[in-house]
Image (tube, rainbow, N blue to C red):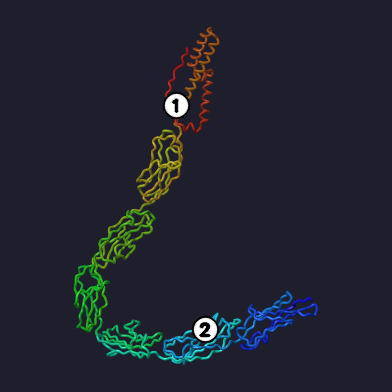
Amino acid sequence: QVFTFNTVEIKVQPSVKVRNGAPMSIICHADISKSTQFQLELNFTIFKDHKLVFMTVSNREDARYEIPVAKSSDTGVYECTVKADKKTKSSSSVSVWVTGMTKPILTADKKDVLEGEVVKLRCELPEEEPPVYFCFRKMKMNSTPKITCPPEPYRKFSEVEFSVEEGDNILQFDCFGKRTVNFEWDTSEYSNKTLITVREPFIKPTLTTTPSSNVTEGDQIQFECSTVVVRMRDIEIILQKDKTILKSVKDKKALKYSTVATLEHSGKYLCKVEQGRASKSTQLNVVVSELFPKPTLAASMTKLDENKDLTLSCNINDFQTANFSILRKNSKGDIPLKKSQTLTMRVNVNDTGSYTCRAEVKGIVKESKPVRINVYAPVSKPTLSVVGGSPEVVLGKPLQLICHSVMGTPPKNFTFYKGDEVKKTVINDTYATFLDENIRLNDKRGYKCDARNNHSSGMKTSDILNVTVIVPVRDASLGSIPYGEVEDGSETAFLCSVKEGSWPILFKFFRKTDHDVLVYEKSEHADRAMWHKKTMKRQDTGTYYCMASNRANVDVRSHPITISVILAAWKKGVIAAFVLITIAGAGALALWWFLRRKKKAKGPSLEMSGSALAANLTSEKLTRQPNDGDYYSGSGYIEDSENHMKSTDESKGPDLESAEVEYTEVEVSTLDPHR
């Protein structure tokens, strides 16, 4: 008994889109091939959104899942699976949409409410599955319905609260449900309508004024605000003007407020009655006529020198009978100066400030606009100096000057001059600064400044400040006499010079070693400096350079030169003479030793002849000239000795030159021919 699944299909009747409440069938069909005709038991399973909704066992190739009344909750994706004898096959999925939703049910917690109270509504879809949007509508006569739609992802109902506002007399509420299916909105029909009756907790308040709403400054004015309430608890009455609360009462039906009218009391007044969320208000416009205008304060002068007389007078147009006082404004409280219409005083700088006057009629006090009085002390003679102290500047560098005037009332005007040219004007209290950014060699050197304020004495001018321009040192060079090689013990002059630079110039001479050594320094009011080294020694051999600087603080370094200290000529002669004499003495000693040995060999018979021969040879050596070709005595030895000394000196090389030569006196005597 061999079989195989060809296909498994799922179908929806009457269609995949079914109206809510209509019957619907989900059919699962299995197409099977068999080797022979035999009964095969099939297990059918139908899933909706991957959840099991139907299961049956049959020997037929079809299975039906009947839904007699389709609901929107039956919307979803369906598929079926067929199992037989360890073989399983599934169908493709199919989407089913049950359009429309059931009618929701609306209930309210109360049918009769007061303004300001809250109505709680409940909208329910018991046969629908969440998520669902529940939309509530609040409707009243001649008004557009207000709709609110809270989502409910997990519940089949929703509850909301509506506040009953002023003017809500008879209200109607209903609701409907909606949700998205296949990216489209599916909406239910409207629920039953619920009717709510609204009653006023209190009537609109009344606001009155006594004697009337049109009064004159100085008159007594009284406000009264009243209402009629259903219940007194939590009632509050508030009187306000331009958002400013003037008075309030609680648990009372009326409010009274009185005051003396001023111009500031003109405007709109609001009486408001509140209880819970309910609120009602009434407005009233009040006009206060002016009793007298504001006074004006006049000053004889607003800017004057110290020790001058100042007169202040207070006046009211077309009105004379008033109590006047003159005051000086102060942050800690106005200072009364005199209860009079006029004030005359001799001023000093401390009297600078703002002054006002006040006028009082029938208890109404009005104040004038403040008048600013400025009292000036003369400026003192300014001082001009360079920021940093010394009146000098490096060529090409900026120069900052400060002009300072200690005395005088600010603000002060400071003006800077370079020569006779105005460079800058600054307004400040006690000092001002000026920056001359690029100093050139041919600039005018005289600077001055003047200071002035509003005092009648005019301006004061500083002394002229002459500034020294420091030219930096440039292009240092070093030379020596003699140059290059210098004999040991001789004098050497080193000359360090610069192309330009302001005097004095500090010259420093250095000899280069592992750490450069300062050997000489000198400050000169010239562009060069000489260093005389009296005695040069072999250890003075080396490389030298010089550095030059002045008050510009710029060090300039020369190229280095090399000095070699060699042995003096006379010292070379002394050494040569000493060497030759030493060689001659050694030759004579060798000759004596040779003759002595020869004498011993010949015996006594030859002693006299040897002596005579030696005497003749000696005499001949002393009397003949050195250029005689027959001269022998030791000439070959001397020549060899000289060659030996020369080779020895050459082999020593630099060691001989660098060694310190020591000298001694040698006394040379004539050879005795008899010894």
Q: Which residue is drawn at 35% across and 45% down?
A: 524
Report crowding for label 2: few under 14, some 14 to 19, many 20 or more residues within 10 A (C-alpha).
Answer: many
Horizontal and vertical percent position of residue 668 = 44, 20
Q: Do the residues labelled 2 and 1 touch (CB within 8 Å)?
A: no
Asked whether, in this view, residue 224 is left or right of residue 6, the answer is left
Label 2, label 1: how far apart the Cα atoms are:
132 Å
Q: Specify which label sits upstream in the sequence, 2 or 1.
A: 2
Q: Quadrant of residue 163?
A: bottom left
Q: Residue at x 42, y 34 (%)?
A: 537
Q: Which quarter of the figure has residue 453?
A: bottom left
Q: Which mark is residue 356?
A: none
**From the viewer's perspective, is 288 left or right of 505?**
left
**Nearer mark to the viewer, of 2 and 1:** 2
Residue toward you, 159 or 510: 159
Q: Is residue 410 above or below residue 363?
A: above
Per the image, label 2 sits on a secondary structure element best described as strand
Q: Is residue 613 above or below residue 235?
A: above
If the image is split into quadrants, where does the N terminus sit? bottom right
Q: Name the residue under label 2.
A: 158
| Residue nearer the viewer, 131 or 660 | 131
Along the line of sight, which residue is nearer the eye, 158 or 146?
158
Q: In this view, does 470 lie above or below 35?
A: above
- In the image, residue 317 lies at what x, y percent? 23, 83
Secondary structure at badge 1 equals: helix
Q: Residue furthest top?
A: 605
Of the residues shown, which amino acid type is indicated by label 1?
Val
Q: What residue type is labelled 2?
A: Ser
Which residue is label 1 attached to? Answer: 574
Question: 105 and 310: which one is in front?
Answer: 105
- Residue 670: x and y in percent read 45, 17
